Image (tube, rainbow, N blue to C red):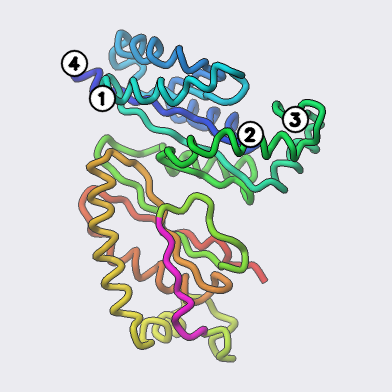
Amino acid sequence: MTSEAVDEELLIVTGMSGAGRSTAADALEDLGWYVVDNLPPMMLKPLVELGGQAGTAFPRIAAVVDIRGGSLFADLKAAIEALRTSGTAQVRILFLDADDDALVRRFEQVRRPHPLQASGTILDGIRAERARLADLRGDSDLVIDTTGLNVHQLTKEIAERFGAETSSSLGVTIQSFGFKYGLPADADVVADMRFLPNPYWLPALAPLDGRAPEVRDYVLGQPGAQAYLDAFASAMRIALDGYRREHKRNATIAIGCTGGKHRSVAIAEALAERLAGAPGVAVSVRHRDLGRE
């Protein structure tokens, strides 16, 4: 096997209609990926072979594959398994998702029918597509929830995830969130900080967030906080090593509390400090729900 074949990458971009596949494809193209849209699964192998013949011209290929392919879409799983078994390229799956309400709004804004709605409603089409894609979503290497993202924010997200990665790097996003606003759809691991006392009930701390030294000291000073953080960081180091061995490029660790303002933020920042020195890992921190009421 040639080194070009080993180094070649194939990113399959898929997901729910209206979740931002076209935006993701445009962003990848801007990052230097060779992008092919609406590709039938049976053409993935020839595409990879063509990329191998081109040498370093197309080291990173992104193929948008989705239900527009109709019955051909059913062949996607077998095509992916064949490529991974052959070892001709590193194959990953990027799945774009959004909640039903957001997808309905987007279809209504552009005044287009959902590809699967037939004589039904837009929501009927979305539900049919979600059922059809359930297994593929579960097999995906990276899921990005675009519910609260506009075009510019999604473009930035793609750039951060795929712009500067190397063959051995693992991008780890530690994301705080509030359970009252729902679980992050793209989380690989979820930790619940609601076992700790809530600073929200202390008048001096309520207006602050978990980045403030006063809140951080309060949260980390609670019984069990340091022990939990140390044990969780140790477990995550083991998981991150495994992700790297399995050639996973991105992982999201979600840290939750009630509102996503105090406990989850403080623990997310502290966890990032503990994982920052892990070999081959690039850690970033995001606070999804800061600023919400």
Q: What residue would you read off at disc 1? A: 7
Count the marks.
4
Give the mark, 2 or 3, whose residue is nearer the N terminus: 3
Please indicate whether residue 116 sits to the left or right of residue 276 in the image. right
Find out whether the residues at labels 2 and 3 contact each other: C-beta distance under 8 Å: no
- The image shows residue 39 at horizontal and vertical percentages of 52, 17
Q: What residue would you read off at disc 3? A: 117
Q: Going 50% across and 18% down the picture, which residue do you hit?
A: 36
Please state which of the two labelled residues, at mark 4 or mark 3, is closer to the viewer: 3
Instruction: Bin the neighbour count of mark 3 within 10 Å (Cα to Cα): few under 14, some 14-19, many 20 and up.
Output: some
Residue 203 picture quarter: bottom right
Secondary element type, mark 1: helix
Q: Going 40% across and 13% down the picture, which residue do you hit?
A: 47
Q: Main secondary structure of the magenta part?
A: loop
Would residue 60 be counted in the magenta stretch?
Answer: no
Q: Can you tell which mark lies on residue 2?
A: 4
Give the mark, 2 or 4, whose residue is nearer the N terminus: 4
Real-space Cα separation, disc 1 to disc 3, in angstroms: 41 Å
Q: Amino acid at mark 2?
A: Glu
Q: What residue would you read off at disc 2? A: 129
Please indicate whether residue 160 sits to the left or right of residue 89 in the image. right
Q: Going 47% across and 18% down the picture, which residue do you hit?
A: 41
In the rendered image, which quarter contains the C terminus? bottom right
Please state which of the two labelled residues, at mark 2 or mark 1, is closer to the viewer: 2
Q: Amino acid at mark 1?
A: Asp
